[in-house]
Amino acid sequence: MTEHGASLEVRPPKSGKTLDAVQNAISVATGRAVYGEYRVLKPGPCMIIEADDPAGARSIKTILERCSAPKDLPLYVVSRVPYEIGPDLFDWMGSQIAKRSLRLLILDSYTSTRASRARGGDIVKQEQADFAGLDELGKRANCAILVIHHTAKGSAGLDWSMMAAGTFAVTASTESQTFIQRFPEFDGAAPERLVRFRSRHASDLEMVLRFRPETLDYEHVLAGGAAALYPLLA
């Protein structure tokens, strides 16, 4: 993700999005390298808005305990907020960023917090306004805002950069996009994930992560052009 503005992370359902979000937050809050490989430029307090899973706060607590996170970790978890994406939510988020000096705010997820779509409305303009507002807030408040989103139904045959649910405005209005998926060549229980990253201000990156059940996090396996070919290498 970029150091300020809005970034997008897209995952299929049940692919470990909460684990990865918490791992990123721990890295930023402690200053430890992400996945042990990628340096955190500006560490500091973090917040996760967990609106997607009613049991999300309990899951996050379990993850923090299992990975032996520091007791005084500046990581705040909010189960739900009484706002949809729009001016009221932006004002609330801005106040939290200022009050807690947040460096990273994770919104999980876009689908769970977006406003209801009016019949006959312009969905492209609505989604563009949502992400443009989040991006403007992040830049103005000097905070990274990571928005978790789901893949579109029937997106398996699409290019990875077009897998996000919704219109092109979802990805076009963010500073960077991360797409995380399982390898279809492996069975459903395989721990490896393919991660693809694209940013306006950095080169594309592909990597392989492996889930570790003992610590409920991901370890870095490899990065570069061979990442997509990992099943063949294995």
Image (spheres, grey):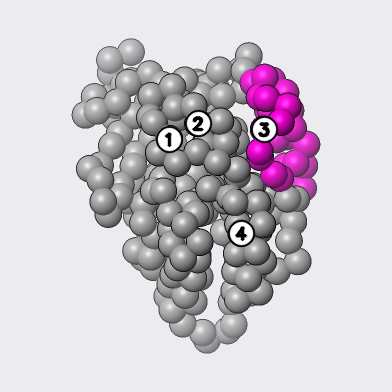
Residue 59 falls inside the magenta stretch = yes
Q: Earlier in the sequence, mark 3 or mark 4?
A: 3
Question: Residue 86 in the image: x percent, y percent?
Answer: 59, 74
Residue type at tag 1: Val
Mark 3 or 4: the one toward you: 4
Circle 2: element type: loop
Asked if residue 11 is positioned above or below residue 113 in the image, the reply reads: above
Residue 90 occupies quadrant: bottom right
Determine which residue is flagged by label 3.
73
Circle number at residue 31: 2
Determine which residue is flagged by label 1.
40
**Does residue 193 appear in the picture of this structure?**
no
Q: Earlier in the sequence, mark 4 or mark 1?
A: 1
Q: Earlier in the sequence, mark 2 or mark 1?
A: 2
Give the class, few, some or many, for how many residues have Cα within 10 Å of label 4's Cα (few <14, many ≥20): few
Circle 4: element type: helix
- In the shown orientation, is residue 132 left or right of residue 160? right
Residue 1 occupies quadrant: top left
Circle number at residue 98: 4
Depth order, front residue of 56/33: 33
Mark 4 or 1: the one toward you: 4
Q: Residue at x 39, y 60 (%)?
A: 174
Give the class, few, some or many, for how many residues have Cα within 10 Å of label 3's Cα (few <14, many ≥20): some
